[in-house]
Amino acid sequence: MNESNYKVPNLEKGILILELLANSNKAMTLNDIKAEVNVSQTTVYRILHTLVRHGYLLYNDASKKYKLSRKMLSLGFQAIQEQSLLEVVLPKMRELRDEVKESVFLGVMGEEKGIFIEQVLGTHAFCFVLTPGKLFDLHCSAPGKALMAFMPEVLRNSYLQKMNYQIYNANTIQNEAAYLKELEKVRELGYAVDREEELHGVICVGAPIFNYSNAPCGAIWLSGPKDRLPDNIIEQHAATIQKFTHSINFELGYHNGNS
């Protein structure tokens, strides 16, 4: 069979444009996109106009830039079958936020990194805000460590092979040996901490969420400035997070006797 007979050129170009916008993690003009995908301006414009018309892209008249819409995120939810996860977790995230006062986030695993999908903003005058769809590293983030620590070994090893241990500062874990040691600690505690490992002055505390398959299907975590999160508060918040993850796990059908 000649596969070229079954190709749809403009569909392939449209997919290429969507992947470009997803990977760039920023809004782009028509000329920016044209330069990257090497497609004629007329074709790029038609594809962009179609994607905007169907709600997959947003267009800003002032900046003349395009970006992915939340409709793309909803498709992602359906693909990974996590819409029910969000329905269960979001009310608990609000309750957790009310107790800890910090911003609370939900993320799941992607192909190579984690993907942030929802947030509940903290009640402090200063709190952290993320953009849905943002990727997070597995080696230096609380949710990344929480997910990797409790993942089945075969799957964890497949992620380990893809990791490059990008170094953000002196606190960042820089190699697999140190990372595996950290994951052992996370398994022992039941939660993970990011102690300024990506951003100076930022502490994150997170724990995994388990579903009926008894495997981690996501993680929730809080982020705050280090002056609000000394060690004793980290421990208190970790216990609070685990209280809520245990409740979430039960609703998702997790049946390990320890949950």
Image (cartoon, rainbow, N blue to C red):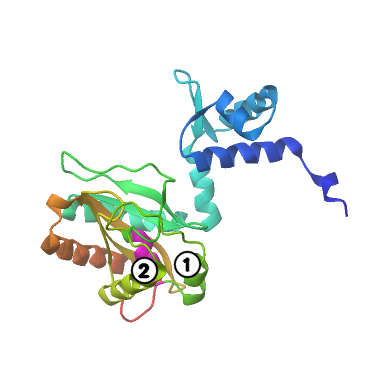
Circle 1 residue: 160
For label 1, count other residues whose C-alpha is less than 10 Å away and answer few (under 14), some (14-19) or many (20+).
some
The extreme right residue here reads 1
The part of the chain drawn in magenta is: 143-150
Residue 10 among those drawn in magenta? no
Q: How far from the left and from the top, in percent, is residue 161?
A: 51, 66
Dot 1 amino acid type:
Leu
Kindly identify the amino acid type of the residue bearing the numbered disc 2.
Answer: Tyr
Q: Earlier in the sequence, mark 1 or mark 2?
A: 1
Q: Main secondary structure of the magenta part?
A: helix
The image position of residue 228, as x and y in percent, is: 13, 51
Quadrant for residue 243, please give it.
Answer: bottom left
How many marks the image carries: the answer is: 2
Relative image position of residue 89 (x, y in whole percent): 35, 57
Q: Are marks 1 and 2 in contact (CB under 8 Å)?
A: yes
Q: CA distance from mark 1 to mark 2?
A: 10 Å
The residue that mark 2 highlights is 179
**Residue pictured at 14% horizontal, 62% vertical:** 231
Return the residue found at the far top: 62
* Among the 4 quarters of the image, the one containing residue 246: bottom left
Q: Position of residue 80 (x, y in %)?
A: 52, 57
How many C-alpha atoms fall within 10 Å of the one at disc 2: few (<14), some, or many (≥20)?
A: many
Name the disc covering residue 259, or none. none
In-front residue for pair 107/176: 176
Task: Please name the residue shown 68% across and 37% down the image.
Answer: 13
Tell me if residue 223 comes above or below residue 19 in the rendering.
Answer: below
Q: Residue at 47% across / 61% down in the picture?
A: 163
**Is 119 left or right of 200, judged from the image as shown?**
right
